Image: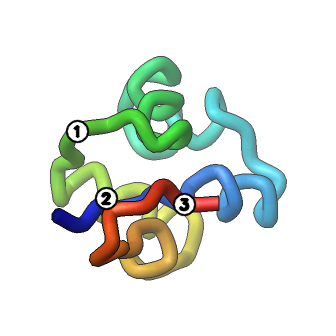
Amino acid sequence: MGSINVHLAVLMAARRIGVAELAEQVGITPANLSILKNDKARAIRFSTLAAICQALGCQPGDILSFDKEGNAHE
């Protein structure tokens, strides 16, 4: 079975934005954003994904990728 990998940490670092600031812009708690950022989330709401894309000026595919082999991302 494949896996979905989250690349939010890379995007946040590239844009020099911290967890607290992005969480405020997106409207979720810093704790929940950290779970997502650290690739520990089991699900994400489309509304949250859309808000993150809006805040970071990116597309969902910049944040998420699918690995058909099921390997953890680098």
Q: How many marks?
A: 3
* Looking at the image, residue 10 lies above or below residue 42: below
**4 lies left or right of 26:** left
Q: Between marks 2 and 3, how big is the CA–CA gap?
A: 19 Å
Left or right: 30 in relation to 9: left
**Which residue: 58% across, 42% down?**
22
Q: Which residue is drawn at 47% across and 67% down?
A: 63
Identified at 19% across, 44% down, the residue is 43
Neighbours of disc 2 within 10 Å: few (<14), some (14-19), many (20+): some
Q: Dot 1 corresponds to which residue?
A: 42
Q: State the residue in front, 45 or 23.
A: 45
The residue that mark 3 highlights is: 73
Instruction: Where is residue 8? Give x, y as percent.
Output: 56, 55
Task: Estimate how packed mark 1 is, as few (under 14), some (14 to 19) or many (20 or more) residues with alpha carbons within 10 Å.
Answer: few
Question: 10 Å neighbourhood of mark 3: few (<14), some, or many (≥20)?
Answer: few
Q: Looking at the image, is mark 2 or mark 3 earlier in the sequence? A: 2
Question: What is the C-alpha distance between the residues marked 1 and 2?
Answer: 13 Å
Q: Which circle's residue, 1 or 2, is located before the other in the chain?
A: 1
Q: Which amino acid does label 3 sit on?
A: His
Left or right: where 16 falls relative to 53: right
Question: Which label lies toward us, 2 or 3?
Answer: 3
Q: Where is residue 59 in the image (x, y as percent from the top left)?
A: 43, 81
Amino acid type at circle 1 is Arg
The spot of residue 2 in percent (x, y) is 24, 67
In front of the other: 51 or 32: 32
Is residue 22 depicted above or below 12 in this figure?
A: above
Please state, as top left, top right, bottom left or bottom right, where the N terminus lies in the image. bottom left
